[in-house]
């Protein structure tokens, strides 16, 4: 591992990213041309001390997961991301899909500009790749780790807690929509190991999914009307829109409500309270669990 070159590369990329590019305010007292170290750490989900050690050319070899998070936080292109992994002496990660996938630049550019509505980028297997702050406040932070547990579809059919995001009476609708969407993806990626493993695991673990799968309903989820249960604001009625990448393997999702509706007012309030839990003591804010 080339500690010195890794440190220099991280700093050069940090200097290049402007706060507005990642939805951060531009204050009058900035002394650096780009992001501060603590801002990069926050965007990547790392401690400020850990990231500072990396930029100083110290510390242990970062994992592939950490490198992927840094690549997203610093808005690295494909070649830059490969270079980052090379400097850290890690194998070059797969670029097509999965939780380590690089968010496609066009979708990431749009996500950076969606600052007044919840938005996130996911894979076609419903693995979250990037979120804006309002999406974290509405849906909860992205789950850690790797494997099928990162897929919301997998957790929907295997973890009852995941269903708390929607009112119980809406669960049958979402189960049908998720299954029909996965049918379409599986047909397009028939020889893909990740897809086949996910479908096999769901058929094995969920009788509900197995029954729905046999119906062979097929429909990519492009738009949907959702009622989302928020711990502080109650049920929020929103429209969910999807923009697909050119290859169909990533999607930008954003949520909106018509002006003048209760949902629109709740979104405005969500932007104020952020991830603070109004039901908890004032000194105990915390992110919502999906």
Image (spheres, rainbow, N blue to C red):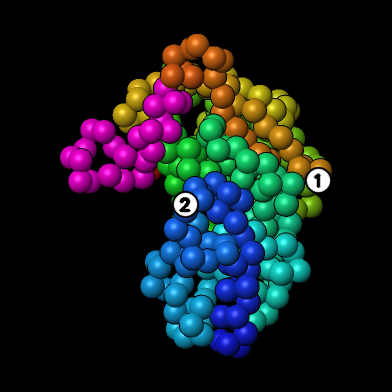
Q: Position of residue 185 (x, y in %)?
A: 73, 40
Q: Is residue 219 magenta?
A: no
Residue in the picture at 55% in, 54% down: 19
Foreground of the two, 160 or 82: 82
Q: CA distance from mark 2 to mark 1?
A: 38 Å
**Comparing labels 2 and 1, the label whose residue is closer to the camera:** 2
Residue in the picture at 56% in, 80% down: 7
Q: Position of residue 31 (x, y in %)?
A: 49, 65
Q: Quadrant of the N terminus?
A: bottom right
Q: Position of residue 166 (x, y in %)?
A: 44, 26
Foreground of the two, 263 or 213: 263
Q: Secondary structure at mark 1?
A: loop
What residue is disc 1 on? 247
Side of 245 where 120 appears, left or right? left
Q: Main secondary structure of the magenta part?
A: loop
What residue is disc 2 on? 27
The span shown in magenta is 266-287
Outermost residue, top side: 260
Outermost residue, front side: 28
The disc, 2 or 1, on the residue closer to the chain's N-terminal end is 2
């Amino acid at each position: 591992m080339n500690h010195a070159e890794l440190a220099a590369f991280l700093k050069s990329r940090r200097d290049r990213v402007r706060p507005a590019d990642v939805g951060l305010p531009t204050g009058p007292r900035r002394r650096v041309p780009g992001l501060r170290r603590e801002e990069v750490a926050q965007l990547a989900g790392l401690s400020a001390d850990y990231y500072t050690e990396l930029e100083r050319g110290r510390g242990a070899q970062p994992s592939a997961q950490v490198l992927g998070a840094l690549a997203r936080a610093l808005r690295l292109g494909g070649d830059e991301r490969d270079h980052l992994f090379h400097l850290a002496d890690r194998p070059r990660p797969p670029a097509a899909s999965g939780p380590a996938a690089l968010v496609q630049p066009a979708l990431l550019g749009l996500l950076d500009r969606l600052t007044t509505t919840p938005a996130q980028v996911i894979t076609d297997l419903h693995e979250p790749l990037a979120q804006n702050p309002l999406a974290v406040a509405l849906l909860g932070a992205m789950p850690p780790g790797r494997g099928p547990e990162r897929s919301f579809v997998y957790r929907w059919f295997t973890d009852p807690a995941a269903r708390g995001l929607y009112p119980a009476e809406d669960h049958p609708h979402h189960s049908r929509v998720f299954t029909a969407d996965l049918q379409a993806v599986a047909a397009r990626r028939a020889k893909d190991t990740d897809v086949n493993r996910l479908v096999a695991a769901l058929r094995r673990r969920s009788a509900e999914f197995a029954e729905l799968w046999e119906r062979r309903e097929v429909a990519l989820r492009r738009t949907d009307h959702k009622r989302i249960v928020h711990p502080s604001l109650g049920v929020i009625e929103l429209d969910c829109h999807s923009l697909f990448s050119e290859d169909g393997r990533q999607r930008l999702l954003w949520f909106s409500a018509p002006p003048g509706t209760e949902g629109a007012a709740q979104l405005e309030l969500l932007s104020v309270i952020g991830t603070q839990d109004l039901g908890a003591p004032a000194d105990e804010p915390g992110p919502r669990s999906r």
